[in-house]
Image: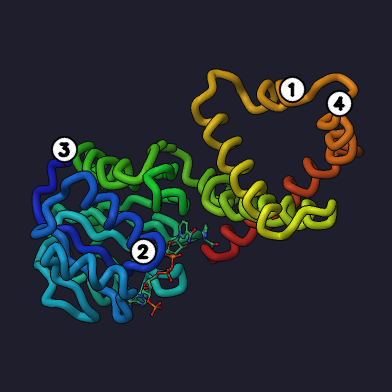
Amino acid sequence: MTMALTGPLLLVGAGKMGGALLEGWLRRGLDPAKIFIQDPALPDAMRRLAGTHGIVAGESPSLPQAPAVIVLAVKPALAEAVLTAIAPKLGAGTVVLSIAAGRTLESLAEPLHETCAVVRAMPNTPAAVGEGITVCVANDRTSESQRTVCEALLSAVGDVVWVEDEALMDAVTAVSGSGPAYVFHLAECLAEAGIEAGLPPDLAARLARATVAGAGALLKQSEHDAATLRRNVTSPNGTTAAALDVLMEDEALKSLLARAVSAAAKRSRDLSS
Ligand SMILES: NC(=O)C1=CN([C@@H]2O[C@H](COP(=O)(O)OP(=O)(O)OC[C@H]3O[C@@H](n4cnc5c(N)ncnc54)[C@H](OP(=O)(O)O)[C@@H]3O)[C@@H](O)[C@H]2O)C=CC1
Ligand SMILES: O=C(O)[C@@H]1CCC=N1
């Protein structure tokens, strides 16, 4: 991995997201000797992965002093307590990279020394297959080289976008952070609708899964935007038009999704207070 890690990397929390990041770093060739993992209940898969690569991991492993990066991937409610406990380990050049939803740069910096570099990031679960997207914002203590290191770590699991306005992070969380769940729910609903239309459950689930995955792959690879791709499926007076008449009637799906995204963004704001 082409990243200028000037010291050890401490991953705090190796659950779904921390684990996806770890796998991405190892895939990209990050030196396992530089990685330390703190997690009191390391999931089995992560325990095996750490063991295979000889990575120091555990509830309170002997942690390196002054790590180059601390990646914080615990539940938001634990963020400050965990940082308070780790703060004595921080060095002048340490950057804290947090993926905790709703935890602001200010609240993350509060338990740390006042010059600490902090990056707030919002990835999503397609990171597990290297297809994530992460949006990040840095505090004004973060140097260019620290941004570069954070970007390299996050780009191991997908695209990375920087924003300067932290206020955008609530809407980001609501669209791309939580977004995969909306798409998976669409797949669930499509499968159920297929069963209602007479398909055997196995076939309905298979068709729904392949259709959502295939449409996603097409959307990713195509030069066309989503609206054009939708129109490409829709023959005049055909079956798709009949379905879209229902979905788009009174902008039903559009307004439902707007309400869902608004609820998620509100929850993100609430988590910060
Ligand atoms: N899941 C998602 O789609 C996304 C999640 N996020 C954010 O990522 C963070 C992690 O979420 P996710 O990976 O889903 O959660 P998980 O519960 O899968 O992972 C969190 C891990 O941290 C462990 N943990 C608990 N306490 C500590 C501690 N004191 N020190 C170190 N590790 C600890 C947990 O152990 P145990 O299970 O025993 O509690 C668990 O293994 C959250 O802040 C979330 O907001 C961001 C983007 C997307
Ligand atoms: O649901 C959550 O709070 C986290 C953040 C984005 C996705 N999962």
Q: Is residue 260 visible?
A: no
Tell me, for residue 2, which label it has, or none: 3
Q: Report the Cα–Cα distance between label 2 and label 3.
A: 23 Å
In the image, is 262 to the left or to the right of 5? Answer: right
User: Relative to residue 191, is residue 16 depicted above or below?
Assistant: below
Q: Nearer the viewer, residue 113 or 36?
A: 36
- Point out the tag, 4 or 1, that comes first from the N-terminus: 1
In the image, is 245 to the left or to the right of 128? Answer: right
Q: Quadrant of ligand 1?
A: bottom left
Q: Report the Cα–Cα distance between label 2 and label 4.
A: 48 Å
Tell me, for residue 238, which label it has, or none: 4
Check whether the beta carbons of the residues at disc 4 and disc 1 lie within 8 A of each other: no
Tell me, for residue 247, which label it has, or none: none
Disc 2 versus disc 3: nearer the observer: 3
- Point out the tag, 2 or 1, that comes first from the N-terminus: 2
Is ligand 1 less than 8 Å from the beta carbon at label 2? yes
Q: Quadrant of residue 223?
A: top right
Residue 66 percent location from the top left of the image: 11, 62
Q: Which residue is mark 2?
A: 73
Q: Name the residue type under label 3.
A: Thr
Q: Name the residue type under label 2.
A: Ala
Mark 1 lies on a secondary structure that is helix
Disc 2 versus disc 4: nearer the observer: 4
Disc 4 versus disc 1: nearer the observer: 4
